Amino acid sequence: MQKTNEPGFGHIDIRALRFLAEVLMRRSVTQAGEAFGLSQPAASRLLAQLRHALGSDPLLVRASTGGYVPTTRAIELLPRLHEAIAATNRVFAQPGFEPGKSTRTFRIATTDYGAAVVVPALVRALRAEAPGISLELCAWSVETLGDLEEGRTDFALYTDEILPQGFHYAPLFDESFALLLRSDHPILDSRDHSGHIAPSELATLPRVVLLYPDGSKMGVDDPLAEYGRQFGPGDLRTPHFLSAPLSVIGSDFVLCVPRRMAHLMATANDLAVVDFPEADPITYCMIWHDRAEMDAGMAWVRDRLKSAIGPVSEDKR
């Protein structure tokens, strides 16, 4: 423990350092005290504390002209004081973010669906407004929430699942489902005047079934199962959204996917899209942790994503 009669800075705060810098620049305790709203006695007591902390160096001594001049120690101290005050100002400065100058990398956890449907809109927005910002995608997994909490990932794209305490979410759009079949599939002749096919008929077809991360295991996304045949011989299970339609081409398979993904897949692979309103819709969201809530750069990217994805949620509805 430091004794009260020994020099040291344990009782000196940043305000005292600012006062000392003012004293040395003005070469006047009275003027420095007035600048800090201190009375003459209070300013003198504070200077005495500073002198004691600095080993009883007087800091200012009388000059022959009647004023004061700084001691050698005081002259050495002044640039160091400016450095310390500037460093403290940086510590307590409000964080800013200039998109056009930023070279940050933001890490996003997502499935194939988010990478195909959401990320391209964000990429276009960033290229237009913040070309120095980079994105890094990683697969959604059982570790994702922990990665968000620890800062290994900045935000994630996922459905409106219940989140643990400390997490935030913002809806991007509501999503319905559709079915993909080869464009000359005979079951397409069963479409009614609105282009709809009875789920019981579709459920008789062999199908590609998508898997998705569900806690520590993979969940099965097979909305046709409740209308007839369960997953069985000849079917295909896969966690890969983007390669799944390749198994539909030239086969009798049917594939159920979110509607936006269905239209992307159909365009690239000459497949037919059939709406599937019987499947429960989902709300697609971005999620992040409390630790990133006040991050100015993160807030800007989140806002930009919500704005950029707006037109997507109106397309294909």
Image: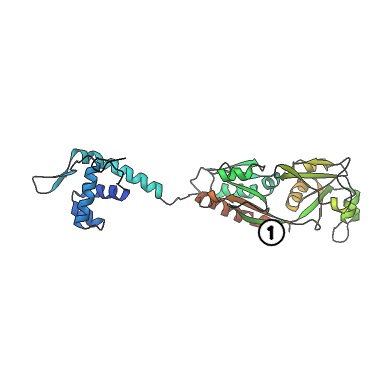
Residue 151 % position (x, y): 55, 43
- Identity of the residue drawn at 85% across and 61% down: 194
Residue that sits furthest to the bottom in the current view? 193
- Spot occupied by residue 105 in the image (x, y as percentages of width and height): 55, 42
Residue farthest along the left direction in this orientation: 64
Helix, strand or loop status at disc 1 = helix
Q: At x 59% / y 42%, what residue is drawn?
A: 147
Q: How many marks?
A: 1
Q: Quadrant of residue 211?
A: top right
Question: Where is mark 1, residue-wise?
Answer: 314
Q: Is residue 6 above or below residue 186?
A: above
The residue type indicated by label 1 comes to Glu
Image coloring type: rainbow
287 or 127: nearer the viewer: 287
**In the image, what residue occupies the spot 67% across and 57% down?**
173
Q: Position of residue 155 (x, y in %)?
A: 59, 47
Count neighbours of disc 1 (C-alpha within 10 A) and say few if under 14, some if 14 to 19, many if 20 or more. Answer: few
Q: 119 or 131, which is in the foreground?
A: 119
Locate residue 271 relative to residue 135 in the image: left or right: right
Q: Is residue 177 visible?
A: yes
The N terminus appears in which quarter of the rendering? top left
Q: Quadrant of residue 191?
A: bottom right
* Front residue (pair 272, 146): 146
23 on left or right of 179? left
Which quadrant of the figure contains the C terminus? Answer: bottom right
Residue at the spot 24% in from the left edge and 45% down from the top edge: 50
Residue 252: x, y in percent?
A: 88, 44
Horizontal side of residue 75 vs 122, given as left or right: left
Residue 23 appears in the figure: no
